[in-house]
Amino acid sequence: MLRALKVFWSSLGGLYYELFLLMGVNLAWLGLSLLVVTAPPATAGVYYLAHHLARGESVRFSLFVQGMRRYFGRSWLLAIVVVAINALLVGNILFYANFANQWVRLLSVFWGYVLLFWLAMLIYLFPLLIEQESKSLLLLLRNAALLVLDNVAFTLTLGVLLLLFLLLNVALAVPLFLIVMSGLALIQSKALLTVLEKYREPTGAPE
């Protein structure tokens, strides 16, 4: 829990120090997301810039454009997978919830837990797309699932903090709405780098 709070707080610090750049990137992401074809690459561009910022490197707007170009195809494949799995899980929940038999309806609870696990995986998916050398989508999904399973408390705490960040953006509307995507990407990127630290030690988990 403390690690997640530390990641969240340090991300807010990074957001503050690069506020105007991240606002510009967020506005560019909003504009490009209105066009379906550029929405996933724009998202990848935000995470690419956030990845460099999370590492403590100097960042500039051109990193956003570079990330869009570099991950144009992969970001689209990942977006298709995310949308498909979201639709499948929500569809299963609604399907079983409408059964008259209460025992069958319990399957909707099972799929609800699967959906929560999937939402936890989403915390790591786009940051992993940038971080890992292999861009295989199956490896990406596997690694995200393993990170959730091996860091349950950290991931759940971070998920709550991300939800609070989103709710705060909704509550304050215009001021924080200008940095919502940049903020989420930075928090998630810092979170990934934090959990990966232990696996980079000699006694860490196997790849």
Image (spheres, helix red, strand yellow):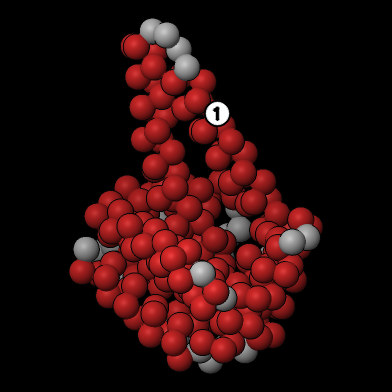
Mark 1 nearby-residue class (10 Å; few <14, some 14–19, many ≥20): some
- Is label 1 in a helix, a strand or a loop? helix
Question: In this rendering, does residue 51 appear at all?
Answer: no
Relative depth, front residue between 100 and 130: 100
Q: Please state which amino acid type lies under the numbered disc 1.
A: Gly
Q: Position of residue 188 (x, y in %)?
A: 44, 66
Q: Is residue 101 above or below residue 112?
A: above
Give the image quarter of residue 86: top right
Residue sitting nearer the eye, 12 or 58: 12
Q: Residue furthest top?
A: 101
Compared across the picture, whether 203 is left or right of 181 comes to left
**x and y, in percent, of residue 172 in the image:** 46, 71
Quick check: can you spot residue 80?
Answer: yes
Please report the residue visible at 39 percent of the width from the left and 80 percent of the height from the top. Answer: 12
Residue 175 or residue 161, whichever sits in front: 175
Q: Quadrant of the C terminus?
A: bottom left
Seen in the picture, residue 79 relative to 172 is either above or below; the reply is: above
Residue that appears at 40% across and 50% down: 120
**Residue at the (21%, 63%) spot, across then down:** 1
Residue 9, image x, y percentages: 32, 78
Which residue is labeled 1 in the image? 91
The location of residue 20, given as percent across then percent down, is 56, 89
Residue at horizontal 67%, vertical 46%?
80
Left of 35 or right of it: where is 110?
A: left
State how many labels appear: 1
Q: Residue furthest left?
A: 2
Q: Is residue 75 above or below residue 81?
A: below
